[in-house]
Amino acid sequence: MSGVEGAVTEFLQIIQLSLGVSFAATAIATAVALPLGSALAVVDFPGRRAVVVLANAFFGLPPVVVGLILYLALSRSGPLGLLGWLFTPAAMIVAQALLAMPIITALVHRASERAWARYGDELICDGASRRQAILQILAIIRADIITAVLAGFGRTVSEVGAVILVGGNIRGATRTMTTTIALQTSQGDLSLALALGAVLVGISISISATVFALAGRARTAGSDET
Amino acid sequence: MRAIRIAAAALALICAAPAMAAGKSIVLASTTSVEASGLLAAILPQFTARTGITVNVVAQGTGKAIDTARRGDADLLLVHDPEAEQQFMDEGHGATRRQIAWNDFIIVGPDADPAKVRGGNDSVAALKAIAAAKSPFVSRGDKSGTNAAELRLWKLAAQSPDALGKETWYRDIGGGMGQALNAASAMAAYTLSDRGTWLSFNNKGPLGIAIEGDSRLLNRYDVIELSPSKHAASKLDDAKVFADWLVSPDGQQAIGAFKVGGQQLFVPSASAPR
């Protein structure tokens, strides 16, 4: 495992896994959070307030607690042990999705609530069904959705407590940027850890910039059509 | 819709990662010392090249590693706490337990040496002097093999863990070996370390070796195969291939050949009497 080439390959693998896991987790969380967050604003159902309070409270869900609960659940002696997901990327994706979901849900709900207060009566007068209303609201708040999804992605890509527990920080299999930084620090390679940290921040910035650039272009294109 | 497409792309990305390529693999629950010292990274490629079995190392403190194996989440165990290992065997979780190598613990401390212990080889007298001088001492406090060894030494120095916990100079950091060394380096404190992690550690700061060469500082590593009756779901056959390789002449040679800065870190000892 010596040689610059091997180190670069390993480093790229780590970045690939980090981003892959975080993208997948964010996508899963988004797929649940968009309809849920919007429905919480549009549809009144028993327990709605409780869900909203929970989603907001879970903003601060400690990753290590999520990791521990998931660890116990996915353990071979736990209820989901048969899946064989512990110490695999699948477990990391689930953990991060659970962490991102409340954030995206709460942010989407907040934006939806404002949009619903403003356009809700109109939508009802137009005879929109609940389903249509939710889709309309989501279309109206698409700029806020970008912020919400990026916030969720930020949570997943920066997180270390949960992925190290359920992933196990296995070299070449479940080692991400954050767990590598933790490992380098524990080996006293502080400068290497710091360099990796800089790469992580750089990647986060470029992803955010790319998304906003794409969103800006989409908005311009959209206004041409209308 | 877009979210689904992104998810699919991300999953494809993960599946494309070469490390996840199909093939035989086992999960080895092991200690931070064999991972952080670089030993496993050095010898595993030789084993994988020979057998096609990938060894996925989950490096934890010995206490946690044993617990991981007990829960059935590992296929093989490589640890260094004789008492905890014996208990694991007594509970019927282990099938065979074989020594593969040893190295030694050392007490490291700051150059200023406030307890005046540098240069000796009596670890128990040194701990007594550290306690008498109330010099800062960092404890792993994580139920690792090193932590267990440290507490055994303190017991010999007539100090109980409970009494130590009340002392302000005794700093229980609840972390891995590297974290403990980072903390000791920052606080100019003494701590017990395995020699492997110490030699490959790059943030020594004011620290140097204070005590070494005491027979009570012996640190032996055992590989434990799991019992088929309690761990039928584990990949015991592939695990056995790796355990057998570790004690084979090939494996022993690989362990002995591992060096950091020209220094051998582990002494192969598969043939040593128990």
Image (cartoon, coloured by chain):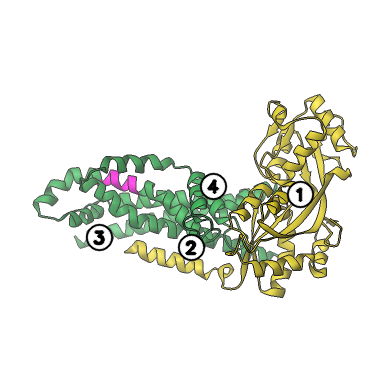
Chain colours: A green, B yellow
Q: Is residue B112 visible?
A: no
Question: Alpha carbon of mark 2 to alpha carbon of mark 3: how far?
Answer: 44 Å
Under mark 4, the amino acid is: Gly
Question: Alpha carbon of mark 4 to alpha carbon of mark 1: how far?
Answer: 30 Å
Find out whether residue A16 is within the magenta segment: no
Under mark 2, the amino acid is: Leu
Comparing labels 1 and 3, the label whose residue is closer to the camera? 1
Under mark 1, the amino acid is: Pro
Residue assigned mark 3: A222
Tag 1 and tag 3, C-beta contact below 8 Å: no
The answer as to whether the residues below labels 2 and 3 share one chain is: yes
Q: Earlier in the sequence, mark 2 or mark 3?
A: 2
Question: Alpha carbon of mark 1 to alpha carbon of mark 2: how far?
Answer: 33 Å
- Answer with the quarter of the image where residue B205 lies: top right
Residue assigned mark 4: A161
Question: Alpha carbon of mark 2 to alpha carbon of mark 4: how far?
Answer: 22 Å
Residue assigned mark 2: A83
Chain letter of disc 4? A
The residue lying toward the viewer, choosing from A74 and B83, is: B83
Query: In the rendered structure, which segment of residues is drawn in magenta?
Result: A105-112
